[in-house]
Image (cartoon, coloured by chain):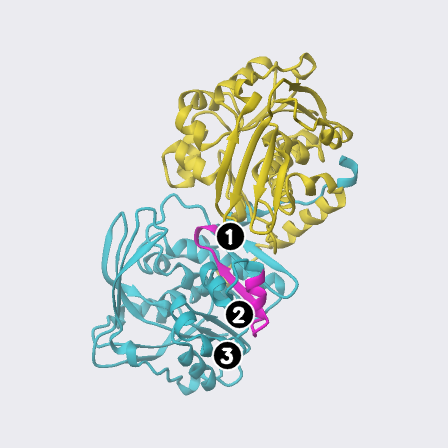
Chain colours: A yellow, B cyan
Amino acid sequence: MSILCVGSIALDSVETPFAKAERVLGGSAVFFASAATLFAPVRLVGVVGDDYPLDDLDFLTNRGADLSGIEQREGKSFFWAGRYHSDLSGRDTLATELGVFADFQPKIPEPFRQSRYVFLGNIDPVLQHDVLDQVESPEVIACDTMNYWIEGGRESLVSLLDRVHILMVNDEEARQLADEPNLLRASRWIRERGPDIVVVKKGEHGAILFADDWLFHVPGFPLEEVFDPTGAGDAFAGGFMGHIAAAGSLDTDDIRRAMVYGSVMGSYAVERFSVDRLIDLIPDAIEERMLGFHQMTAFEALVQVEERV
Amino acid sequence: MSILCVGSIALDSVETPFAKAERVLGGSAVFFASAATLFAPVRLVGVVGDDYPLDDLDFLTNRGADLSGIEQREGKSFFWAGRYHSDLSGRDTLATELGVFADFQPKIPEPFRQSRYVFLGNIDPVLQHDVLDQVESPEVIACDTMNYWIEGGRESLVSLLDRVHILMVNDEEARQLADEPNLLRASRWIRERGPDIVVVKKGEHGAILFADDWLFHVPGFPLEEVFDPTGAGDAFAGGFMGHIAAAGSLDTDDIRRAMVYGSVMGSYAVERFSVDRLIDLIPDAIEERMLGFHQMTAFEALVQVEERV
């Protein structure tokens, strides 16, 4: 069950309180695929310049990814530079150079058009519409976005909602999109416009999923060192969609597990720069942390309240 | 298994974006007891002025509380007034009038001194020491504190840590006490000074418990309306200690359930002003929300990772 993923493929320069990395692999599609390929094959669509170290993506091919949708063009690759604050909760953007990404027009290769699972990374909602126009009968479409599009591309973003099944955003974005501070009400506003499911990512506080008559919460995994938070949300999306595609199911049990796999992948992503930790990750480590989440959240609700008072 | 609870018994005037309440029941001991008495008998120790509507605490007596440790003195009761910000995440203190609480010297009545369960509400750590000097062989001592004592009473607070089993603080307090932004490391710093267990309350994000070789996370219960956040932390402590005392056990399974009962009681406390919602609460409502927490967090970690890659 391959997942079609369209998003940015970038080079990032990142400064944290601990260290610095120059022009390392980045972008929503790269973080997504680095996580999702540990679960299911991924078909990548994006654009890079002639400066991009495409060989560095070989680990994705080795995990069953199809990179034939990556277009290489003359010019510079999308470049982002940022510096995290001392407690890692905020960051300053030092540079955003769109390069060839500025004229990105996603072209979905013919063999990709029948993908049943689609992840629309954070790009212009007009382009996200274009992608959906090119796929034939997708069963599960998940979509990310950001404040920039909520402000500047609201109309096409809201019309996009009607075409997607799962919206994945952070808590600020959910509130901003719905213009509603309460997350329960904000998620209802969003679901009334299309998606069956809204996943709200809350960084170190985990993530919460809102559906029609149920919800599910997964905490963040407590880490002694958060090394580099870049890409955690896309790695979360990769773990989530990876499990859904591997299970071939949208049962609530599988959606719950998908939430936990998302949090597992997000927690691993932040342990090293770029996708370094995800490149090295072995299946046993995923399973181990999955069990860690279970131990950290499981309880038996067996008490007879009537007898206690 | 009665719980001895020592803390403030106050009158609160509270303004929220929605409404206003004047001189209603408040204080750490009152919120704690309003929650804990739904689980186990509580022995209250505190001081009030001659203006205090002690009859309004009859509901506690009806639930098996022993109020004979409440000293009534000439003068004014502890009065606190505050106004919450529009999103309820912050508040301004408008007035703090200590009244008779300024000279509070906890005297533990003879029949209370053999209590096995003790909750030290947020008061001067010197007084918290005094309370422990008066109890004979407590088995479980839980303790709360606040930034005021972390700054101004650090020495007696740190020496108190060596005498308590469970420290319950919010995330800012844990970080401030340990002078360490990372919660895992902050909780270790605290546990190295005495408590076996540190419970960190994170408001709408729930609470996390750190013990020697395990941890447990419970989310906040998503509510459409948080009416008045005052006392949520003490109600949490009441649900937590109430279950521990009722179960008569510090098994990890019971500690986990205690965390969830804490979150249940905290979530109910904020639905109305003062302890109004806790006065009305019926056991079935506790059980219902307990199950709600279970549905919101439970998942089966049954996947064989080896087969998926």
| Residue B112 visible, this angle | no
The alpha-carbon separation of the residues under discs 1 and 3 comes to: 29 Å
Amino acid type at circle 3 is: Ser
* Label 3: how many Cα within 10 Å (few below 14, some 14–19, many 20+): some
Which residue is identified by label 2?
B166
Residue A5 shown in magenta: no
The alpha-carbon separation of the residues under discs 3 and 2 comes to: 14 Å
Residue at 56% x, 64% y is: B187
The alpha-carbon separation of the residues under discs 1 and 2 comes to: 27 Å
Sequence-wise, the earlier of marks 3 and 2 is 3
Which residue is identified by label 1?
A87
In the shown orientation, is residue B278 left or right of residue A306? left
Q: Which residues are magenta?
A: B185-205
Residue A256 in the image, given as x and y percentages of width and height: 60, 40
Residue B202 shown in magenta: yes
| Label disc, if present, on residue A241 of the rendered structure | none
Residue at 52% x, 58% y is: B181
The answer to whether residue B285 is above or below residue B33 is above
Q: Secondary structure at mark 1?
A: loop
Q: Secondary structure at mark 2?
A: strand
> Foreground: A46 or B68?
A46
